Image (tube, helix red, strand yellow):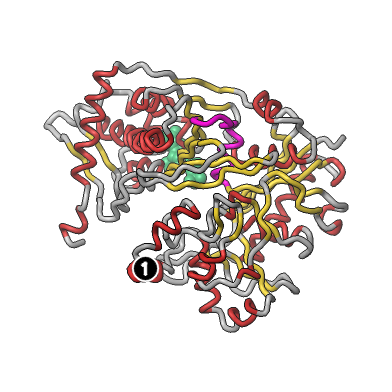
Amino acid sequence: MAKYVMALDAGTTSNRCIIFDQKGNMIAGAQKEFTQFFPHPGWVEHDASEIWQTQLIVAREAMKKAGAEYSDIAAIGITNQRETTILWDRATGQPVSHAIVWQCRRTADFTEELKAKNPGIVEKFRKKTGLVIDPYFSGTKIRWLLDNVPGARERAEKGELCFGTVDSWLIYKLTKGKVHVTDYSNASRTLLFNINTLQWDEELCRILDIPMSLLPEAKPSSCVYGETDPEFFGGPIRIAGACGDQQCALFGQTCFQPGEAKNTYGTGAFLLMNIGEKPILSQNGLVTTIAWGLDHEVVYALEGSVYVAGAAIQWLRDELRVVDSSPDSEYFATRVKDTNGCYVVPAFTGLGAPYWDPYARGVITGLTRGVNKYHIIRATLESLAFQSNDVLQAMERDSGYRLCSLKVDGGACRNDFLMQFQSDISNAPIRRPSCVETTAMGASYLAGLAVGYWDSKEDVIKNWSIDREFTPRMDSEEREKQLRGWRQAVAATRGWAKESGE
Ligand code: ADP
């Protein structure tokens, strides 16, 4: 039996490869950054050929470090930056232009016009795709490429082009053009995929003027899509898993029961809650997405993001210069017993879920003569937990599930003070795993399950080991008091840029 599974983690700024064994141990890894292009303010592009080359280099490097031959690898699983849009020539495999990255806002005017012209359209897209009409998702990016790359629309209409997100692109390249597929989790981020029927939606494609011949076949996240061309790794390896990065982390964190959720505390924070086998549309500003397709079933998730999480700690470091490094924030925050009544709301770029207020701007409230820098550092750390809690509460309201546990990953989950405060304010246990490479682990599990390297999700659960659990210590009166203060502070941010005209 093959010894390992290999995860290709195609991120936004770098590609990584991690090789795992059956116990979920990391055997070897490699990572390489690639170029970010910013051709206009608010535009972000990648070179898809560079993404492919970089991914191939790190995969070969990791295999070399592990001393692994192609036959040692049971399967490859891919996890990827979501929504990033690539169009390429079906015959030559050449991209028609740079990829448009998920962060790119170039279709903002188009989405505004679309919504203004057809007021009913928002609800139509929401019901079918679980999403809001926003430049973030792939649909309007595909349309932009068809309308702006010379000849693209004609070539697409003749069936000469393929669309794919990064998972789809990498599978196409790894199989030397034999396989054009994507998985349900990635498809569910395009605005073109009906998450109820698991089909590309003709009506939505018509509205966005996208020929359906472009689209990859949508398949479960755990299944054998094809084999790598022998040229790449000395022999064929099965490609058996694909899943968007955030959903993959939910899987890697083994959030298999409805009501289980994960939070990734990175630059921003990404929260996903498993809501079981039926989609639930949010009444509270969250999106509904496909978590994964596995074993003939599809699991759905509610998703909400916080724009500024770890970035607020970078602000303490780089702008206020009150800490030398992000981890130092913990030491300073614990020099005081509370925030002395002050709150920081880091709404630097507006507020995301559940408020959706682009005009909100950051505030520090409750300042009195005794507030010092330690209080402000502490309040900034607490803001990560308060913002995450706002999303978790919206998830509970939408799903009817009481949060049973929150599993955590991302850089800032190393901060014990923050984790304890999250547990206190959300009144839920917080579980931090020993291996926080949950995204890559999720991809390897999805692939390994498809080829029998692991038998069932039970094997995966066995491999998840806890580093530390944080349980609530705050009494309910104190929690309510703090939440009231937070709500008051959030209220002070609302509409700020609109009223001040900035
Ligand atoms: P990303 O993947 O978004 O680049 P990471 O998961 O690498 O983010 O996490 C980096 C972020 O986490 C940074 O914004 C940093 O300020 C924050 N961070 C890292 N360690 C800590 C810590 N110990 N306490 C608080 N914040 C931290």
Is residue 142 a member of the stretch shown in magenta?
A: no
Is residue 253 a member of the stretch shown in magenta?
A: yes
Q: Mark 1 — residue?
A: 118
Q: Is residue 249 left or right of residue 427?
A: right
Q: Which one is in front, 345 or 405?
A: 405
Q: Is residue 211 left or right of residue 364?
A: right
Q: Is residue 144 left or right of residue 335?
A: right
| Residue that appears at 45% across and 53% down | 127
In this orientation, does residue 329 appear? yes
Which image quarter is the N terminus in?
Answer: top right
Q: Is residue 99 left or right of residue 75?
A: left
Measured from the top left, where is residue 165 in percent x and y? 60, 59
Q: Which one is in front, 411 or 150?
A: 150
| Residue that appears at 77% across and 48% down | 224
Above or below, 454 relative to 48: above
In this orientation, does residue 30 appear? no
| Residue that appears at 72% across and 36% down | 20
Above or below, 71 relative to 173: above
Q: Which residues are the magenta region?
A: 245-259
Snapshot quadrant of residue 345: top left
